[in-house]
Amino acid sequence: MTDIAQAFIDQSRRFLLKEYLRKIERCVDELSDEDLWWRPNETSNSVGNLLLHLAGNVRQWIVSGVGGAHDGRQRQQEFDEHAPLPAEALLARLREALDDLDRVLDDLDPADLSQRCHIQGLEVTAFEALYHVVEHFSTHLGQIIYITKLRTGRDLRFYEMNADGSVRRGWLGDAKERV
């Protein structure tokens, strides 16, 4: 069972630190400052808000909840922000949170995935916390991709079709990596 638990940790790290972060960076590179903070309406979030929210979620659920660091998250502020913080500052905050997550997961023994954690008033296992963060990140990544395509009208070319019908991840620049 330890091999499966370690595989879960490793794959979660790959999704968050490699695939998802690279897609976010690609989207942010495509957006103007105005587009980064555009909201279709006041009940929706901008890409800037989503980046703040993802960093806060990673910190609260993994860095604090699993790793034991102080939880000073002010969740509502992530959504209330309207000031046009620069793209690089937003990405730096997200990368820092993911670097901290990486350190926590590097130190996490696969057997500790069953440890109980108290997060947002919930009692969950470390496994559930990590599963939540990957799923949550993926959901908001989809929103970021949609907003980017909506605002730019461009194909982000995350995947490219090969002549044989197989798919490769064009955004990684690795023609041999198949999906």
Image (cartoon, rainbow, N blue to C red):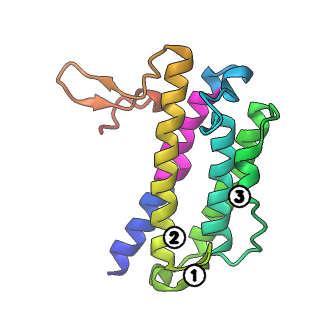
Between discs 2 and 3, the one toward the N terminus: 3
Q: Is residue 138 left or right of residue 22?
A: left
- In reply to whether residue 87 is colored magenta, the answer given is no
Main SS of residues in magenta: helix
Figure check: 145 above or below 76: above
Query: SS for tag 3?
Result: helix
Disc 1 or 3, which lies upstream in sequence?
Answer: 3
Q: Quadrant of the C terminus?
A: top left
User: Mark 1 touching mark 2, by CB under 8 A?
Assistant: yes
Residue 47's x, y, as percent? 63, 35
Residue drawn at x 64%, y 22% as measured from the top left: 31
Identify whether 131 is placed above or below 165: below
Residue 129 marker? 2
C-alpha gap between disc 1 and disc 3: 19 Å
Instruction: Tell me the kind of residue under disc 3.
Output: Arg
Label ID, residue 117: 1
Magenta highlight range: 14-28
Question: Which of the labelled discs sits on residue 75, or is there none?
Answer: 3
For discs 1 and 3, the disc positioned in front in the rendered view: 3
Q: Tell me, yes or no, whether the two marked residues, 1 and 3, touch with CB atoms within 8 Å.
A: no
Expressed as whole percent of the image width and height from the top left, the position of residue 32 reads 69, 19
**N-terminal-most mark, 1 or 2:** 1
Q: Residue at x 46, y 47 (%)?
A: 139
Looking at the rendered structure, the secondary structure element under dot 2 is helix
